Image (cartoon, rainbow, N blue to C red):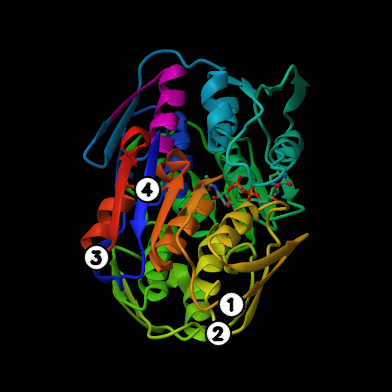
């Protein structure tokens, strides 16, 4: 078992280049199921989740080749309607093949998904939307069995702007009969990226990036070439690493507008921020000002940055408040941060972070992807040695995290348990 070992309190300085966005790549890979011709996707991050999605696609009839950040996908033979249980349980985003399979085959049988341990993550909004488009849905033995001879356009109101439901429904509607309107749609940049990809292969999707998306169904999609947007969450993680250590980091290959809420918050906390075409730089001296952060759907503050910013605020000059409004149970990192000397109380959806002068190194365990990133950030700030286990979670979303941090001066390495 691997551990990330960090000797903290070194100010990080330099440039980091971001990969393409995992959360854009996964739905776009699922959408290649809609194509009748080959597709080439560039800027795909070489991550475990991407491998899992390609395993899912291969298992249902696509040929997927991954080489140097580029993925080529083509249909190998007839499509299958049931991806393997292990892959779907391992990664919630595998559930995104439901919409496209229903379009192409008129049926799909998908295991109910698993994923990170961050609270209840139902799929009711995906299913209600598909039912509104005429699909019959049955839940049998842990599987979703969906059937529809041809989906028809409908007006769908989402009770919550779920990213995954918006994406699944957008894909399903792209080949439905007539027009679909998704109201209270998710507005995340990754949703816009999927819409742009769908339009590249022949769909008609308008309004992505607003709360109302209109899709006019069409059949017979071709293929195409597409480049995935940069990863805003990876970018924010490195910016936090820079400012939390009293250093200065410039992140390249990033779209600054995707980080508006995050950059506003770190500026409020005292960071100097500058942005330009495809880069963001941030630096900071001394301890952060305490701030209040509330996670919200985009363009609000991203829930995926809640744990990372909590590490940064753990040493602020005063008491910060974090309100988690997207997921019900996403404070597993609090206990681990407290083991490093933080003073954080979490109750329900609130966390109260009483800033301490410094964190101290400890052995801690990552329980999910972003909690893992938060613990690495805490280790970079802490006095002494921190050992983070649960590295496989971190690898789901960060490509070469340790190598990239090393290049900007961090004393960090990966060790196998035997040598640790
Ligand atoms: C995506 C991101 C994830 C991010 C999340 C919120 C990917 C691969 N993952 O996950 O990193 O943390 O958006 O920004 O893009 N919900 C329901 N019913 C549903 C669907 C969702 O109640 O049918 C609830 C969830 O329980 C959760 C909230 O809606 O409380 C947000 O979930 P959603 O936006 O769907 O997240 P994902 O698409 O799974």
128 relative to 263 in the view: left or right: right
At a point 58% along the width and 64% down the height, the residue shown is 298
Please tell me which of labels 2 and 1 falls first in the chain: 2
The Cα–Cα distance between marks 1 and 4, rounded to whole angstroms, is 25 Å
Circle number at residue 408? 3
Query: Tag 3 or tag 4, which sits nearer the N-term?
Result: 4
Give the image quarter of residue 354: bottom right
Q: Earlier in the sequence, mark 1 or mark 3?
A: 1
Separation (CA) of disc 1 from disc 3:
26 Å
Front label number (4 vs 3): 4
Closer-to-camera residue (214/1): 1
Q: Quadrant of the C terminus?
A: top left
Crowdedness near tag 1: few (<14), some (14–19) or many (≥20) residues, C-alpha within 10 Å: many
**Badge 3: residue crowd in 10 Å (few <14, some 14–19, many ≥20):** many
> Is the C-beta separation of discs 2 and 3 under 8 Å?
no
Q: Which picture quadrant has residue 153? A: top right
Q: Is 60 or 169 nearer to us in this picture?
A: 60
Does residue 57 belong to the magenta stretch? Answer: yes
The dot on residue 4 is 4
Residue 220 percent coordinates (x, y): 45, 30
Q: Earlier in the sequence, mark 2 or mark 4?
A: 4
Give left or right: position of 55 versus 323: left
Q: Which residues are magenta?
A: 48-65
Q: What's the distance in space between the residues labelled 2 and 1, CA to CA?
A: 6 Å
Task: State the separation of the CA atoms marked 2 and 4.
Answer: 28 Å
Magenta segment's dominant SS is helix
Label 1 or label 3, whichever lies nearer to me, is 1
Q: Give the residue pinned by disc 1.
A: 355
Q: Residues within 10 Å of mark 2 (few under 14, many from 20)?
A: some
Q: Which residue in the protein does label 2 denote?
A: 317
């Amino acid at each position: 078992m691997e551990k990330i070992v960090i000797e903290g309190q070194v100010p990080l300085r330099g440039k980091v280049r971001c990969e393409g966005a995992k959360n854009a790549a996964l739905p776009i890979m699922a959408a290649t199921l809609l194509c009748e011709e080959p597709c080439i996707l560039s800027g795909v991050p070489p991550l475990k989740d991407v491998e899992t999605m390609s395993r899912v696609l291969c298992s249902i009839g696509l040929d997927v080749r991954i080489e140097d950040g580029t993925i080529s996908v083509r249909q190998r033979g007839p499509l299958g309607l049931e991806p393997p249980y292990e892959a779907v349980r391992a990664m919630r985003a595998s559930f995104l093949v439901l919409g496209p399979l229903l379009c192409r085959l008129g049926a799909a049988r998908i295991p109910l998904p698993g994923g990170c341990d961050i609270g209840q993550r139902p799929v009711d909004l995906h299913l209600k939307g598909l039912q509104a488009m005429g699909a019959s849905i049955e839940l049998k033995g842990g599987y979703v069995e969906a059937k529809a001879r041809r989906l028809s356009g409908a007006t769908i109101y989402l009770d919550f702007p779920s990213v995954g439901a918006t994406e699944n429904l957008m894909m399903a509607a792209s080949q439905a009969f007539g027009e679909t309107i998704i109201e209270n749609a998710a507005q995340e940049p990754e949703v816009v990226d999927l819409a742009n990809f769908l339009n590249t292969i022949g769909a008609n999707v308008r309004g992505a990036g607003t709360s109302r998306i209109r899709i006019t169904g069409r059949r017979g999609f071709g293929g195409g070439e597409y480049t995935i947007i940069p990863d805003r969450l990876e970018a924010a993680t490195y910016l936090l690493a820079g400012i939390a250590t009293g250093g200065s980091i410039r992140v390249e290959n990033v779209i600054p507008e995707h980080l508006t809420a995050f950059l506003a918050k770190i500026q409020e906390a005292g960071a100097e921020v500058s942005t330009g075409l495809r880069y963001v730089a941030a630096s900071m001296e001394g301890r952060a000002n305490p701030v209040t952060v509330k996670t919200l759907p985009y363009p609000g503050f991203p829930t995926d940055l809640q744990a990372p910013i909590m590490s940064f605020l753990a040493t602020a000059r005063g008491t910060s408040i974090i309100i988690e409004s997207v997921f019900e149970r996403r404070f597993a990192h609090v206990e681990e941060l407290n083991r490093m000397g933080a003073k954080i109380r979490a109750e329900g959806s609130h966390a109260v972070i009483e800033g301490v002068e410094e964190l101290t190194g400890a052995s801690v365990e990552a329980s999910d992807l972003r909690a893992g990133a938060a613990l690495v950030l805490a280790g970079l700030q802490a006095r002494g040695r921190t050992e983070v286990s649960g590295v496989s979670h971190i690898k789901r979303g960060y490509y070469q995290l340790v190598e990239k941090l090393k290049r900007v001066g961090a004393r960090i390495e990966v060790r196998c348990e035997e040598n640790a």
